[in-house]
């Protein structure tokens, strides 16, 4: 059967613009789908760079203003891969124009900005999704399968970390094209909205709703040079963030993220301890899931490292042969494949905007708790 064309307009040609474009180009090569993305236009503010990107990734045209992209009637889906301060305005306009909307995480800079985005896509009734891509690491999807099958039994503990070390130097400036993550006006928050957002999304997916949190944050370097003005500027993002959480299922959790963990580049890890089994995962070794099962024969009991590369493992039958690994970029291809599959069978592919709002509620509660010094309910 001939696949239907899905005409894509992408906003932003940076890091995520590349991962998404790669997914659009690869997805039909590896997944049998009834939709085929067509790269109609890419939007970026610098015309030369946008043209270079379009030529390199195969987009048919270029727009310099996202409003022009949203207004085009030859685009079915708007994909937002630009910084956090642009998400709400673009997503709401795209939904109102009747476009499907895919948006990078976090949904908005804060809860107040994210809530109307959900309302807009719900009112317009347009398919929507947020790129919390770590759900689609095959080892993480396998963890979800094991938990849903009851392999862990009652869950007692959830422990997540996301560690980086790229802002330790006080010489790293703030703001501008490259360092918008350090500018609270653009990013909304620091590591809570940037890194912990991923940990929270995965945790809500694997372990259910979080009932309440107690957080603390720190800004280690209080002043940096603004990359645009050259002037000294106050740093208003959280450099590090940690929180305790109680899940609705009764389990206790710790979450931590920082950009000051010398030696760590993108160390996203989680460990879950249940009555019958424990599982652990590590982004630096993303194709492995560690599993300990108490039911194993006593003298052989121990942690086993599952190399998640077999055809029986989630997504892996679409790739090479057992034993051969895939990587980071494939998580975006998997998420897109699921979204396109959902379009054919009418399923809502998560995380939808509504799902992502739950993450925003936890982020909001963590930041409020860090300010007030009290426990805050999320539900
Ligand atoms: N899912 C993930 O794992 C993941 C990883 C990194 C970033 N992100 C998210 O993706 C988004 C983009 O991050 P990035 O790392 O790709 O940033 P980036 O700085 O590499 O790229 C951002 C792009 O947006 C463009 N842009 C900025 N303002 C714009 C505007 N008003 N109109 C059109 N284009 C505009 C920039 O020119 C640039 O091309 C952020 O929301 C970020 O949180 C998600």
Image: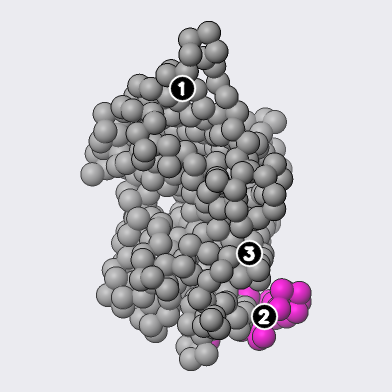
Seen in the image, is 171 located left or right of residue 245? Answer: right
Give neighbour class at mark 1: few <14, some 14-19, many 20+ (Cα, 10 Å): some
Residue 80 within the segment the image draws in magenta: no
Residue depicted at x 25% and y 36%: 248
Seen in the image, is 322 located left or right of residue 191? Answer: right
104 lies above or below 281: below
Residue 212 in view, yes or no: no
Residue 272, horizontal then vertical, whole percent = 43, 29
Nearest the camera: 124 or 115?
124
The CA distance from mark 1 to mark 2 is: 49 Å
- In the rendering, which numbered label is found on residue 30? 3
The residue identified by callout 1 is 293
Q: Mark 2 or mark 1, which is nearer the start of the sequence? A: 2
Residue 83 in view, yes or no: yes
Mark 2: secondary structure: loop
- In the rendering, which numbered label is found on residue 59? 2
| Magenta region | 44-68
31 lies above or below 52: above
């Amino acid at each position: 059967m001939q696949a239907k064309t899905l005409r894509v307009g992408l906003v932003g040609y940076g890091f995520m613009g590349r991962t998404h474009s790669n997914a659009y180009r690869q997805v039909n090569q590896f997944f049998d789908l009834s939709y085929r993305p067509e790269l109609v236009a890419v939007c970026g503010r610098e015309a030369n760079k946008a043209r270079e990107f379009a030529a390199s990734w195969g987009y048919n045209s270029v727009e310099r203003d996202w409003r022009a992209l949203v207004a085009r009637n030859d685009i079915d889906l708007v994909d937002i891969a630009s910084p956090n301060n642009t998400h709400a305005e673009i997503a709401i306009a795209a939904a109102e124009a009747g476009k499907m909307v895919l948006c990078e995480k976090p949904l908005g800079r804060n809860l107040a900005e994210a809530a109307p985005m959900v309302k807009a896509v719900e009112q317009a009734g347009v398919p929507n999704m947020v790129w919390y891509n770590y759900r689609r690491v095959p080892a993480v999807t396998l963890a979800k399968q094991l938990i849903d099958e009851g392999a862990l039994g009652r869950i007692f503990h959830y422990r997540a970390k996301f560690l980086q070390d790229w802002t330790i130097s006080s010489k790293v400036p703030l703001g501008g094209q490259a360092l918008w993550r350090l500018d609270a006006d653009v990013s909304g928050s620091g590591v809570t909205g940037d890194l912990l957002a991923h940990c929270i999304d995965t945790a809500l997916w694997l372990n259910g709703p979080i009932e309440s949190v107690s957080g603390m944050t720190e800004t280690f370097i209080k002043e940096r040079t603004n990359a645009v003005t050259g002037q000294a500027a106050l740093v208003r993002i959280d450099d590090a963030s940690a929180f305790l959480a109680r899940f609705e299922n009764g389990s206790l959790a710790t979450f931590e993220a920082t950009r000051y963990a010398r030696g760590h580049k993108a160390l996203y890890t989680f460990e879950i301890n249940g009555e019958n089994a424990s599982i652990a995962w590590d982004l630096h070794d993303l194709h492995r899931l560690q599993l300990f099962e108490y039911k194993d024969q006593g003298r052989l009991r121990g942690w086993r490292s599952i190399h998640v590369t077999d055809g029986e493992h989630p997504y892996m039958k679409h790739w090479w042969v057992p034993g051969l690994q895939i990587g980071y970029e494939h998580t975006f291809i998997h998420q897109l494949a699921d979204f396109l599959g959902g379009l054919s069978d009418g399923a809502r592919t998560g995380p939808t905007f509504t799902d992502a709002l739950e993450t925003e509620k936890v982020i909001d509660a963590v930041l409020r708790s860090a300010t007030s010094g009290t426990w805050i309910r999320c539900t």
